[in-house]
């Protein structure tokens, strides 16, 4: 087959989805080369997922979401009632990577200095020196993030968005990779501080953790009922592998029609009537362009984890709920009708045409 053969010739094999790239055409050799890179680079992440499954039973969606955040350099908000292994899953992820990890328990009396660090006076020299806080690491578990006051939220916001912190008059870059994995309890609101919309929007995904099935719960019982010799996680991934995988994820093919589909999904949260979605009057504020970027990036990571070098429509649909649920503000009418953002996103996916 000639080298100049365009990827259009293998259109049907790609589930009616053509890759997108900065070039105008692609050869089968281009696709095959990318597929080989994806196959090789995704193996350590598959090994990491298997290590995490030694500790976590079920919760496949949560584990996949953690890896998507890692691949996309995006922060994650994990919500669920107590006892569903949210903290354990994050700890298992960190244990499987040869990198730094800090768990910070957020409490109402936490100060910004407890998070980012502060200036320390040295009497013997008469100088101030910087004492760095626990946020100077690769993976940060912000446990029960909604229990911290507004000043701590603001300090965390700079770290999440700019990947840097300011202590005194100095600004310090955070290590790479750097990812914040925050947990919160949806049912206990006493003594909590609701996250501001600006910070919520900084989280690439909001993962909602549900109860295990009876079968999975029995497996948890059989595996974890002992107080000694519980399963552990061995490190199988290096930070360099994460950075290399991110470069490959950036090159995952996304067809122009799929880009239009992602834009349509997000735009329909702002003007549902324009896209014939029956949500008029139910959304006070729709998602921002940051949601569109997160949607496509997460879809690329999903394709990478599935061993593909191209995105298909189902990839976007699979990640849309996690990307959009925390970026939609319900109207009073929607709240009166006891609608949830998950219900609205489901309606979007049902009515916005798939290319």
Image: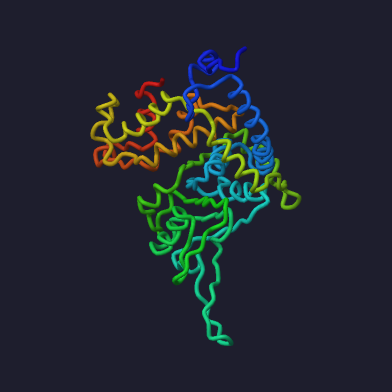
Q: Nearer the viewer, residue 133 or 126?
A: 126
Looking at the image, is 198 positioned above or below residue 107? Answer: above
Residue appearing at x 41%, y 20% in the figure: 355
What is the quadrant of the N terminus in the image?
Answer: top right
Coloring applied to the structure: rainbow
Looking at the image, is 165 positioned above or below residue 251? Answer: below
Looking at the image, is 308 positioned above or below residue 207? Answer: above
Q: Nearer the viewer, residue 204 or 86?
A: 204
As drawn, is 335 to the left or to the right of 227?
left
Residue appearing at x 31%, y 42% in the figure: 329
Residue appearing at x 69%, y 38% in the figure: 47
Residue 89, position as x, y percentages in the image: 60, 46
Number of callouts: 0
Residue 226, position as x, y percentages in the image: 72, 48
Q: Quadrant of residue 221?
A: top right
Residue 167, position as x, y percentages in the image: 47, 69
Which residue lies most toward the right here?
229
Residue 70, position as x, y percentages in the image: 56, 44
């Amino acid at each position: 087959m000639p080298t100049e053969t365009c990827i259009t010739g293998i259109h049907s094999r790609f589930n009616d989805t053509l890759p997108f790239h900065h070039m105008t055409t692609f050869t089968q050799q281009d696709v095959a080369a990318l597929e080989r890179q994806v196959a090789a680079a995704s193996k350590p992440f598959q090994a990491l997922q298997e290590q995490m499954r030694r500790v976590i039973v079920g919760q496949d969606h949560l584990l996949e979401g953690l890896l998507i955040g890692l691949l996309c350099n995006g922060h994650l908000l994990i919500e669920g009632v107590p006892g569903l292994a949210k903290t354990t899953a994050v700890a298992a992820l960190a244990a499987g990577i040869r990198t730094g990890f800090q768990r910070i328990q957020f409490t109402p009396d936490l100060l910004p200095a407890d998070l980012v660090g502060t200036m320390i006076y040295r009497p013997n020299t008469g100088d101030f020196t910087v004492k760095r806080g626990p946020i100077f690491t690769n993976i940060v578990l912000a446990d029960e993030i909604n229990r911290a006051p507004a000043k701590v939220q603001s300090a965390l916001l700079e770290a999440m968005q700019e990947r840097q912190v300011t202590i005194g008059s100095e600004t310090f870059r955070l290590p790479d990779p750097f990812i914040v994995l925050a947990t919160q309890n949806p049912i206990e609101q006493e003594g909590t501080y609701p996250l501001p919309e600006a910070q919520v929007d900084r989280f690439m995904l909001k993962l909602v953790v549900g109860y295990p099935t009876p079968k999975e719960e029995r497996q948890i019982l059989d595996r974890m009922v002992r107080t000694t010799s519980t399963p552990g996680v061995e490190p199988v991934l290096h930070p360099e592998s994460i950075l290399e995988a991110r470069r490959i994820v950036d090159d995952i093919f996304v067809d122009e029609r799929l880009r239009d589909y992602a834009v349509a999904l997000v735009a329909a949260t702002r003007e549902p009537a324009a896209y014939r979605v029956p949500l008029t009057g139910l959304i006070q504020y729709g998602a921002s362009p940051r949601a569109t970027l997160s949607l496509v990036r997460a879809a690329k990571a999903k394709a990478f984890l599935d061993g593909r070098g191209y995105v298909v429509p189902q990839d976007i649909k699979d990640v849309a709920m996690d990307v959009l649920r925390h970026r939609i503000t319900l109207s009073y009418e929607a709240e009166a009708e006891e609608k949830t953002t998950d219900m609205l996103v489901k309606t979007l996916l049902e009515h916005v045409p798939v290319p």
